[in-house]
Amino acid sequence: MMGTFWRAERAAGRHRRCGGAMIASVAVVVAHILYPVRVASAYHNESASPDPQEHDAESSRISPAQCQPLARLKRKFDNSWINHLSPETQANRARSHRTVNVEDDGVSNTISRPVYNGHYVPVKPTALKNPRLVIHAADVANMLDLSDNDVSSTAFLKLFSGDVESAFDGISMPGGGDDDRTHPTWATPYALSIMGDRYTSNCPFKTGDGYGDGRAISLGEVRVSEDNAQHPAGARYELQLKGSGPTPFCRGADGRAVLRSSIREFLASEAMAALGISTTRALSLIVSDGPDGDTVDRPWYSDRNTRKDAPSINDPLLSRYSLQQRRQIIRDWTLWSKSDPDVLIKEPCAITTRVSPSYIRVGHFDLYARRIIGQEQGNRTDEWKELEQMLWHTCFREYPKECFEPYWKVRDAYSAVKCLLKNSMDDLSTMTANWIRVGFAQGNFNADNCLIAGRTMDYGPFGFMDEYHPLFAKWTGSGDHYGFMNQPTAGYANFKVLVESLMPLIERNEAGIETAKNDKSSILSEAQALFDTKVKEIFRVKLGFHPMDSNADTLWVTLEPLLRASHADWTVFWRQLYMIAAKEFTVQTETTASEGRNAESMLEYLVNAFYKPIGDQVKDDFISWIGSWRSALAASFSVRTQNMPYIEPAVRMRTANPKYILREWMLVDAYTRSSPPVLKSMPFSDAVDPSKGDDYTIHELLDLVQSPYGEGSVAQEKKYYRRAPDEALIAGGTAFMS
């Protein structure tokens, strides 16, 4: 379980004396959502977790050269991915270049080409011209032990804009050898599966060998003290530069990200973390600035590109259809009346540095399993080795205490597989259920965008839902399968790919084919039930019940059609429902609820959640539902047990139903202000004092989303606690996107 508690930083570990000058940061008290820290034992040539006293003693002996900005960061790099796993062989690299008829320069590795083996390829980032730091997350910087001096330095700007070697200029390492400046960076291959079906059509070579990190390059893995760790896998975080140029997996694209999409990714990463949902984090956002900066052309939406209003249920054109058919037509119109961009615009390039304990995807296992399954000549040593290496490395990175330490020394791959699947199942089902809780739609939840440990990543065509619809998605290509309420099903489909990808290891490691079939069947049955249960638990808590109390299940079943019929705003509705629980009644005994206004008057709390006035029938249904809800909460008091302690409904509901989410119209407002010559302001944008600068709204939103469950200031509530503006529900790039 996650726990929130106050923690003071140790001032002693934050002081460094360099050449007679003291660099110190004031010790502060910060609230963090933390997991229990779990640290793996030594693995391959992995060093043991550092002793804090040794770390402090070593810090006191830092040379003047190592007191430069980022010196401490460089000393913390420990890249287990390239230390534990296999590189592309020289023979296969040569074969690959022959395939695309391109000469290998031996350095950049930025040409789209097939990669036939290995877990990574070295890739040199393409640095941004004229880099400027737009924003950074102080919490993430602190987690990585980066001081204010580090963040404000030129070295920081260089490193996280892709100029890696120059950033570390003059910083030597203990026992560093002849070339201390060399810093390895890499990209990884993986496969594409959509809803459990394996694809190769997106690969330019139609083999699956050209798919992988197309514009994200790993900068390295940083070891931090256990005090700073914020994840159960322990004190290791991998840094990736997203938008840092082409890789062998770019599939002919430029490998760049633009400021618009980078602002969305940065803010969404930090918003999800504050919501208590497992996610990759964002350290920094750097833009290529000015008239001489890097730009790329991207398709986008003109002012004319809007979604047309759906016909009404009484439209004469629909008169020949039954009521049920008319409802289906309107539903389909709402879902599919999305269009693609209609103009090409030139946008500034940007790089977001994302941070995570690992970026191990279901797609990684998918790739290596395909290479085994596709072999016609039996067991190929290299292919089997790469899949098994992936297994042990994942256990080491994500589940060291549970799945690595008990089984690695005895090489019990069978038990490690089952342990990995059990933990991944739990993490993925928890993540997708929490997406439902906060109204988040990932949009493109393929297996290659699905991290093994249930961590939200790749904030591309995502969106937070305004008006409720069970199949909501921002992306024009999401379809029903990635619609809002179908996301747990998509998560299960990705988990199924993981199970199928690991079955060859069960078959090979003494268990046999029959055991593998039985294990697969039982694991998938358990997973299906767990994904369903996690969603039920989410709605129970959102309604104020204990997560194990099934009394709430019928309440959600009857509420769901009311939310559709009333055109309810997902976030405002649930938060206002919490207000009813908080202000109008509390459960006092197993049979009574406190006196409060009647259900009809309580409905007034919900009026502002509806995008259209509700009719008499819907109003009556809501009044009836509120009465049933209140009675069920009172009844739940009587079934409390040691395993189901009673907590006031309002207490549960406040922490399950955020007041502030990152709505698309807010993001549009932020990125149009940051790129005024490029992107036109939207009609729902408020005037901002020009003296505050173009990036002011980005910082304002970061401040807002870091406290999503609080009431906020008067100004924040007035500006951001509201339904989406009507224009935002139809505008291309806001209501939907490609």
Image: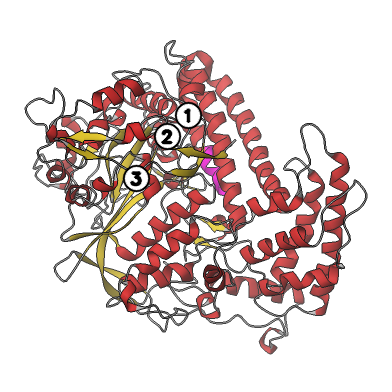
Give the alpha-carbon distance from disc 1 to disc 3, as whole Å.
19 Å
Front one among 533 and 689: 689
Looking at the rendering, which quadrant does residue 408 occupy? top left
**SS under mark 3:** helix
Residue 161, percent from left and from top = 22, 52
Horizontal relation, residue 239 to residue 575: left or right:
left
| Residue assigned mark 1 | 37
Let me know if residue 488 appears in the view.
no
The span shown in magenta is: 490-496
Q: Residue at x 30, y 44 (%)?
A: 240
| Residue assigned mark 3 | 141
Q: Is residue 699 magenta?
A: no
Residue that extends furthest to the bottom in the rendered view of this protein: 316
Front one among 520 and 585: 585
| Residue assigned mark 2 | 229
Q: Are marks 1 and 2 in contact (CB under 8 Å)?
A: yes
**SS under mark 2:** loop
Let me know if residue 729 appears in the view.
yes
Q: Is residue 493 magenta?
A: yes
